[in-house]
Image (tube, grey):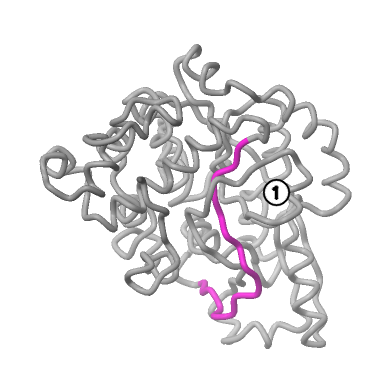
Amino acid sequence: MKKLMLSSVLGVAALAIAGSASSAATLDDVKAKGFVQCGVSQGLPGFSNPDADGNWSGLDVDFCRAVAAAIFGDGDAVKFTPLSAKERFTALQSGETDLLSRNTTWTMSRDTQLGLNFAGVNYYDGQGFMIRTEMGINSALELSGASICTNTGTTTELNVADYFRANNMEYELVAFEKADEVVAAYDAGRCDVYTTDASGLYAQRLKLTNPGEHKVLPEIISKEPLGPVVRQGDDQWFNIVKWVHIATVNAEELGITSANVDEMMGGDNPSVKRLLGVEGEFGAGIGLENDWAAKVIKAVGNYGEIFDRNVGPDTPLGIARGVNALWTKGGLMYGPPIR
C-alpha cells in the first residue's frame, strides 16, 4: 500500500512521538507476555488471510511467525491484529502491536515523520489496474472516462491522479476504507476498474464472483517496496526484525531449507555455520540465542519456501518470482552477510 497523505502524517505526529519514547525494551515486553502481537491486513489471500476457523496464513503472516520463532523457538507464539490501511500506523505507534507486517510500502515520509522504521523489503511491488475482460481493454492507456475503485488511507488516489493527468485522461474515483468494501463494490459493478498493488489485485481477484472474468493490465505505475515496520526508539527490536528477514534470504542463497537445517549445521561452509549459530556469537548481539536463525528456518523455511508456499506459481495467485528472485538469479533479494 502507499504512503499517507500529508494531512494524515500531521494527524498522527503526536502518537509517533509518544510511541518512539515508549518503545524501548520491546523484546522484554514480548518475552513477558509470551507472544508477538503482529498487525496484519484484514484479509489479503497469499499475504495475510484467515480461514473459516480463524487460522492465519500468508507471506506476511509467515514473517510474523519467523520473528516469534527467533525469540521463542515457536512459530505459533504470535497473535494477529487485523488492521485497515487507515488504522495500521496508529496501532503500531500506540503499542497495540509489536510489529506491522501488512503489505505496507516503505516511503520517505513514513520512515521519517511517523516515528517508524522499515526493517527491509520482503516483497517488491507496484500499483496496477484490474478490469473485466469483457471490456476489451488491453492497456491502462485505454481507461479514459473510467470509474475506479480503491482504498482510502493510502496514496493510491495520488498515483492514479498523476497517471491520468500525465496521459491527459479523465476518470471518476470511488473510494472505501476497507479492502473488502472495495472488492464488493467492484464485483457489484459500481466501478469499471479496481486499482491497488499488483499483488493485491491477484489476491483480491480470488474473492470475486467469477475470478476468471477479470484480468490485471500490464502497466505498473508506481514503486511499492513492501516490508515489516517497527516503532523507532528500540534498536534491539529493530535489529531483530531486520535480521530475521535477512536470515531467510541468506538461507535461500546458501541452500538451507526447513528440511535440511540440521544436516547443514554439520557441514563445512563457514557462512552456513555463522547463520545457523554453530560458530560465532551473533545471536547475543540482538538479545537472542545463537541458533535463532536455525529456529526461524525450521519454523517457516527460507525466503523462497515462504514465497512459493503463499503466492508462488503453484498457488491460486500464481505469481512468478520476477524481481523478488534472489540477486544471483536476476532479482532484487539480497541479504547482507552474517559475520
Please determine whether, in this image, residue 53 is positioned above or below residue 181. Answer: above
Q: Nearer the viewer, residue 183 or 58?
A: 58
Q: Quadrant of residue 311?
A: bottom left
Q: Secondary structure at mark 1?
A: helix
In the image: residue 234, left or right of residue 161: left
Q: Quadrant of residue 13?
A: top right
In the image: residue 16, left or right of residue 314: right
What residue is shown at x 82% (from left), y 54% (from top)? Answer: 5
On the rendered image, what quadrant is the N terminus found in? bottom right
What residue is shown at x 36% (from left), y 64% (from top)? Answer: 326
Q: Nearer the viewer, residue 230 or 60?
A: 230
On the rendered image, what quadrant is the C terminus found in? top left
What residue occupies the far top of the structure in this picture? 32
Q: Reply yes or no: does residue 216 show up in magenta.
A: yes
Rendered location of residue 250, percent (x, y): 33, 52
Q: Quadrant of residue 117?
A: top right
Kind of residue sitting beneath label 1: Asp
Rendered location of residue 83, percent (x, y): 63, 38
Instruction: Tally the marks.
Output: 1
Q: Nearer the viewer, residue 113 or 56?
A: 113
Q: Reply yes or no: does residue 50 show up in magenta.
A: no
Rendered location of residue 338, percent (x, y): 36, 46
Q: Nearer the viewer, residue 9 or 263?
A: 263
What residue is shown at x 61% (from left), y 72% (from top)? Answer: 129
**Within-10-Å neighbours for mark 1: few <14, some 14–19, many 20+:** some
Rendered location of residue 176, percent (x, y): 74, 52
Please determine whether, in this image, residue 141 is positioned above or below residue 244. Answer: below
What residue is shown at x 66% (from left), y 66% (from top)? Answer: 189
Magenta span of residues: 214-230
Query: Circle 1 sits on which residue?
Result: 111
